[in-house]
Image (cartoon, rainbow, N blue to C red):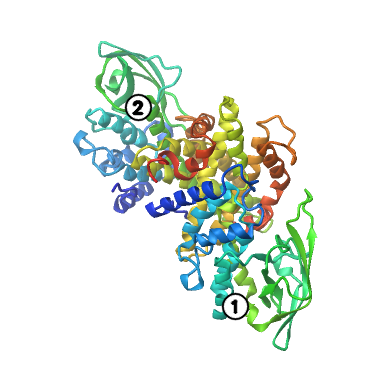
Amino acid sequence: MPLGFELVELTADERALQQEVREFLARELPRGSFEPGLGMDNPSDRGFSKRLAQRGWVGMAIPKRYGGHERGAVYRFIVVEELLRWGAPIHHHWTADRQSAQVILKFGTEEQKQRFIPAICAGELGFSIGLSEPDAGSDLAAIKTRAVKVDGGWQVNGTKVWTTGAHETDWFIMLCRTSDAEDRHDGLSQLLVDLHSPGVQINAIPFLDGGHHFNEVVLTDVFVPDDLLVGEEGRGWLQTGSELSFERGGPDRLLSPWLLVEEFLREHEGTPLGERATATLGWAVARFWGIRQLSIAVNRMIDQGRAPAAESALVKDMATRFEQDVIEAVRQLVEVSPSLESGSLFERLLARSVLAGPSYTIRGGTTEVLVGVVSKGLR
Amino acid sequence: MTTTTADELLVDTARKVFIETCTFEVVEAAERDGWAAGVWEAVAGVGLPWVGVPEAVGGVGGTLADALAVLRLAGQHSAPIPLAETGLLAGWLLASAGLPVGQGPATVVPGSARDSLSLGGGRLTGTAFGVPWASAVERIVLLVEDGGRWKVGSIAAVDAEVERSLNLAGEPRDTITLDGVPVELAPTDVDAAAFERRGALTRVVLMAGALDAMSRLTLDYTAGREQFGRPVARFQLVQEHLVHCAQDAALVGIAADAASRAAVLGDASFEIAAAKALASRAATTATRAAHQAHGAMGMTREYALHHLSRRLWAWRSEFGDEHRWNNEVGTAAIAAGADELYPLVANGSDRRTRT
């Protein structure tokens, strides 16, 4: 069955919110006053995350009793798309807001909810993702990190990799093996791990451009108390599957090269663009517009209590392949050798996009894995 | 408050009519004979061609949303009749000028660079190309400039000399030659750009229907067809085709929804341009994926894939191909400027007035 995406019509309130975010950004973070990031690849700024939280723009899809705003996924979409397209420094709270708080909300104990979620909603607590390992990337069930039951908690040993931002964030939700089972999807559990715990060693894995985003997180005899087990012991696989719907369906999978397009136009304002550049610009804008409608539709499904695993994978795959196409299309419109040191913002963004672009179809589930997920949904 | 969703009862009725009448054999026969009287009679019998045309000029009422929802189903079922032309195009033009809508099928002159029609003394002379179903309709409607303003003209099809011609899908796209044919004329507020957009909207909606049907057909075929001891849908490389086809169907489906909704509400210039650009591109990529997944069977006359793929190839060029509409969207983007570019994407044509 092809999947059903329903067009989302924004309400008057949602449009007013959109306007409010735009005005906030123009005032708080005027263009030219900061180096904008490419979508979610942008700097961490705890102060900015707190200011957003004070406006009620962190934890929007979280119940009020945990410090959230009970606004839902579409409301969050509207706010974060504006932040992303502006290139605002949202990295500090990004993962916590997008998925960690949702996991704790859905599977955590009342005590965990009280302890973590209000701090996430305040923009204070940053999270990373503790899934991939040296021998377990797309084949996540192959993870080897193991937690052994000890008095009062768990003793954890293992290594996580590609852990974006772990050198700057505070916690991660870690998938690990807590027992051996016939089916390797059983016996996995999720633990909340304080990245400042004794035995946690964080080593940079330099990105290909020399930047520091990725880390290796080595856990040696790390003690995790019993009360930091998330959900049910042995149910970690299913809980992780639900987490990925939140990770895949959002505007962050579409808007990475947005500023590249916008800055291309800004740099050429006042000069005739010619037919080829006009058509390329039109191609990109039409596709941003169309895929955005699908992405917002996925978020409406989340608000309706559905788990759109296949739909979000379908959109993520299409959106990220498009992101890469945009970079190449824009690159061919200009005669420049992109450089990170260029004096032009457009050229710096182009250089960064070319270097980061291949990661778009890898992070958050590779194209190849997504094809499998969508195919299951289409059967 | 304007209704932006279609009447469910009407959509159900339309679906039943198309399922019952548009069988594989009927669609084949229509291509051979140039007309499908049975389909037209059933569809006209429940008033579907005139949905969205005001009763005052001879339509059956209902909304634009209703008419577009019915047209989408026609696209899904490869309905071999001038449904878009009779109501959404000819009926709309006639209504805009207060001219009566007749009983039978009608069409419009899409207008091409080669056309040579000229108006003089209330009569039309010259040639027009690619007129859909001209050989089968009773009335031909066109938009003409007369003394510096736009007018709708309506002529009886019997007055035109019709030379049969076909598009890639075997749908009539005829050449008409007029020799001083009397024309009923009345002024309209529709201009050439609005007419082209309206035409593009009908093709987007038809294509959304066809892409949806093509995605389903391809899923069904690959689930049943076995090679190397298992359904071909189990192979990862085949799955990639299925996913790409479903993505195109989803993208054009939601673009058609958004363009339809904007058209119901008012200014839809951005949405229709963007949607036709996406649909025309998807016609290329989705048919490539669907055909590859079907293998040789998809290339045969006996199997229904070509009813959909050939229509998509024809419709992607009609009322502007992807290059033409990409340019239109690009021009709108340049006019919006860098600061207003994202608001254009997020809010569309009415980004200033609808906040």
Viewer-proximal residue, B216 or A205?
A205
Q: Position of residue A169 (x, y in %)?
A: 68, 64
Q: Does dot 2 land on a helix, a strand or a loop?
A: strand
- Nearer the observer: mark 1 or 2; the answer is 1
Give the quarter of the image for residue A153: bottom right
Viewer-proximal residue, A308 or B139?
A308
Q: Is residue B144 above or below residue A32?
A: above
- Amino acid carrying label 2: it is Val
Viewer-proximal residue, A142 or B90?
A142
Q: Position of residue A123 (x, y in %)?
A: 58, 64
- Amino acid carrying label 1: it is Gly
On the image, numbered disc 1 is attached to which residue? A231
Q: Which residue is located at x 35 percent, y 45 percent?
A: B70
Q: Residues within 10 Å of mark 1 (few under 14, many from 20)?
A: some
Q: CA distance from mark 1 to mark 2?
A: 64 Å
> Is A16 placed left or right of A176 in the picture?
left
Q: Residues within 10 Å of mark 2 (few under 14, many from 20)?
A: many
Give the quarter of the image for residue B104: top left
Proximity of marks 1 and 2: CB atoms separated by less than 8 Å: no
Q: Is residue B108 above or below residue A366?
A: above
Identify the chain of the residue marked 1, using the numbered disc in the image: A
Residue A225 visible to an observer of this rendering? yes
Q: Quadrant of the C terminus of chain A?
A: bottom right
Q: Which residue is located at x 45 percent, y 44 percent?
A: B347
> Is A178 placed left or right of B43 in the picture?
right
> Is B79 placed left or right of B229 in the picture?
left
On the image, numbered disc 2 is attached to which residue? B108
Residue B303 visible to an observer of this rendering? no
Identify the chain of the residue marked 2, using the numbered disc in the image: B
Q: Position of residue B179 (x, y in %)?
A: 32, 12
Q: Position of residue A52 (x, y in %)?
A: 54, 58
